[in-house]
Image: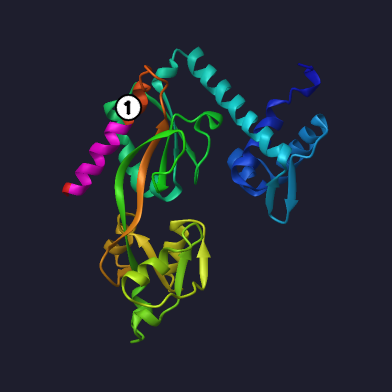
Amino acid sequence: MQRRLLPGMAALLAFDAVARTGSFTGAARDLALTQGAVSRQVAALEGQLGVALVERAGRRVRLTEAGAAYALRARAALEALGQGALEALGQAPEKGLRLAILPTFGTRWLMPRIPGFVRRHPEITLQFATRIGHFDLGAEGMDAAIHSGRADWPGARMTLLLQESVLPVAAPALLKQGQDWRALPVLALASRPRAWAEWLAAKGQPDRVPVMRFEQFATLAQAAAAGMGLALMPAFLIRPELDAGTLVALDQERPSGAGYYFVEPEPAPGARPKRAVALFRDWLLTEIARDTVV
């Protein structure tokens, strides 16, 4: 390989951060650098390779076809270097667990429980990354993932953690006006465009067009708490707001048809799953069962 094609670590880290976050702002925050410094590193990498990797569109960044392909290679290289560092420090690969998690599930449900897993298995080094939707576990350097939706991840073993139920919620102040809550504007999650239609159809009510759409449940919950309209939320994720009274439930829970799954690569014939993956999967199922009993 020609040495002139091998990027510097600073440029590789900057490009990887831009590819992961989708913006120079997010990459700068992730790396504790200025946006200008990140932009210069990416531009230097493009100049070194002689190919455009990103297209700048306002505050957002879109990867070119070449950039998307290079991003997968860059992420795999960085993961390999990180794993090599762990091995050099005496931490065998078997003792590491690289897990892709959903943003809201990770912050609201998983992270408060992680100390319990660490106390039980202090020998396992955990690495977390945020991912939404399907992706190639191997190419991304992930041992497993938490997935929300259907059991439709190709080439993977999926273990159901829990079935999701949803309920409509709103800010208490929005209801003090005395109007029927069914006439209030509705807010929706961009990744679930049919959620309201299915819920309303099950209640025998006509479909309604959402006035706003949001990318993440956390932002949707904040908008509902601010009195912008009704939100259809997973019941187990909205408990803190319901307990605090910043949101109130307007109807009973109903199954959404979606579930939360633990996803791991399908093992080769005769191969055993990675021990750290099996331990984490079993611990998750225990925690879910404990919540169900409570």
Q: Is residue 170 among the parts visible in the rendering? A: no
- Residue 294 percent location from the top left of the image: 17, 49
Tell which residue pokes out farthest to the left in this image: 293
* Residue 284 is covered by the magenta coloring: yes
Tell which residue pokes out farthest to the bottom in this image: 178
Q: Is residue 203 left or right of residue 265?
A: left
Tell which residue pokes out farthest to the front in this image: 269
- Type of amino acid at the residue the image marks with label 1: Ala
Q: Is residue 134 above or below residue 251?
A: above
Q: Is most of the magenta stretch helix, strand or loop?
A: helix
Residue behind mark 1: 278
Q: Is residue 164 above or below residue 86?
A: below
Part of the protein shown in magenta: 281-292
**In which quarter of the view is residue 218 placed?**
bottom left
Colouring used for the render: rainbow
Q: Is residue 290 left or right of residue 190?
A: left
Q: Is residue 37 left or right of residue 171?
A: right
**In which quarter of the view is residue 50 placed?**
top right
* Residue 204 is covered by the magenta coloring: no
